[in-house]
Image (cartoon, rainbow, N blue to C red):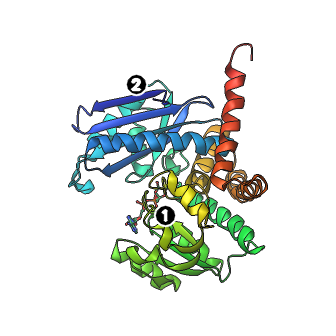
Amino acid sequence: MLDHEQILIRRGPRSGLPVILAVHSTVLGPAAGGLRLWRYPDWRDGLSDALRLSAAMTLKFAAAGLAIGGGKTVVALPHDAQPDSIARHDVLYDVAEAIDSLGGKYAVGPDVGTTPDDMAVIGEVTTHVFCKPQALGGSGDSSPHTARGTLAALRAVTRHLYGDPSLKGRRMALIGLGHVGEHLARLLAAEGADLTVTDIDPAKRSIADELGAAWQSPEDILTTDADILIPAALGGVLTPQVVPNLRCRAITGPANNQLDTAEVGDLLHQRGITWIPDYIASAGGVINAGTTELHGFTPDQALTRVNAIESTVTDLLTTATTLGITPAQAAHDLAHRHLRTAKAQHTPGA
Ligand SMILES: NC(=O)c1ccc[n+]([C@@H]2O[C@H](COP(=O)([O-])OP(=O)(O)OC[C@H]3O[C@@H](n4cnc5c(N)ncnc54)[C@H](O)[C@@H]3O)[C@@H](O)[C@H]2O)c1
């Protein structure tokens, strides 16, 4: 069954690339979600990604208590394309026009493959854009705020596991040293965590050296002995095949769509591994952008709201233990409670 409100697919008139806008829900308010510019084996894989990611955005905003709906844009590059070789300006104008045609139902921000500077270009065509550079009045790069929110989630999980939120000496295995992962690695190092890191880009090894972190290959880190595994690269890393080999007590990270299939959540639970859904652990960036750009919060007020992810995760873990459900189920229930309340308020006679 299609549970998205609207899907717009068009071949970009300038770029010739498939531009896919998925508006999952505007029950809580006009939708928002990032622009993913990424390679796919087939453009339909980009469509599947847009559908999944936009539904996750609805849950992310709902669980964070923000009056924003869920959406996502994917521009599906051919599997052998080099992102640097594409006519970026053309792609961004194609995306901007598609967004503008929705008349404010959906606003875009950066995601994998795009930056605040790209949002500035989109902002030349439409006002429905978040996270433009601060010099242009936007909230800028969301990744430091995303990292800060993940740190808050990690503190809550550490308290759940060991009765103390301190990360000092805790063994953290971090996958991906990109925009979010590098910020997070630095925050964890500052907290005295015992860090092991990886990236498919060998040049990122210098970050490990600088921080005194151990380096492992992307293949081996998944099964490394750790307190918490932190996926901060792309999705789908947790597969049914990987779960029996995991040697961590919990998994909490910002990467979107970590579970290869929904059943992996149950497999993790059966193995006693605590998994916090990515839409909770990665909400810091959208909380910062949404509260500052839409609700006029100061940076300090926004930071307080981002840090509140620690209490959200603590509540989810307590609810899960009390009701004998997974934290993922508790998060799903929390988000859907907010959505039901909003729906009831919009229903005439409700
Ligand atoms: N940027 C944000 O504010 C934000 C917000 C919410 C969620 N996220 C999610 O967090 C994740 C990371 O986002 P980002 O902005 O840091 O992206 P990014 O593209 O800057 O970084 C991803 C990093 O992962 C590495 N990588 C890719 N595949 C890998 C693999 N198999 N093993 C190890 N490393 C691998 C890349 O080389 C890169 O360094 C994504 O899933 C994104 O959707 C990001």
From the Cβ of disc 1, is ligand 1 less than 8 Å away? Answer: yes
User: First in sequence: mark 2 or mark 1?
Assistant: 2
Task: Classify mark 1: residues with Cα within 10 Å, few (<14), some (14-19) or many (20+).
Answer: many
- 94 vs 166: above or below: above
Q: Secondary structure at mark 2?
A: helix
Left of 342 or right of it: where is 73? left
In the rendering, at what x and y percent does residue 236 appear? 43, 57
Residue nearest the viewer, comparing 258 with 325:
325
User: Which residue is at a point 73% across and 67% down the rendered structure image?
Assistant: 160
- 196 vs 51: above or below: below
Q: Amino acid at mark 2?
A: Ser
**Ligand 1 found in image quarter:** bottom left
For residue 55, which numbered disc appears in the image?
none
Counting the numbered discs, the total is 2
Q: Is residue 297 visible?
A: yes
Name the residue carrying label 1. 232
Q: Quadrant of residue 19?
A: top left
- 125 vs 344: above or below: below
Q: Quadrant of residue 334?
A: top right
Name the residue carrying label 2. 101
In the rendering, at what x and y percent does residue 44 appear? 30, 40
Q: Amino acid at mark 1?
A: Ala
Task: Classify mark 2: residues with Cα within 10 Å, few (<14), some (14-19) or many (20+).
Answer: few
Location of the C terminus (image quadrant): top right
Eye-nearest disc, 2 or 1: 1
Marks 2 and 1 sit apart, C-alpha to C-alpha, by 33 Å
- 143 vs 339: above or below: below
Residue nearest the viewer, comparing 183 with 172:
172
In the rendering, at what x and y percent does residue 201 appear? 34, 72
Residue farthest toward the front in the current orientation of the protein: 270
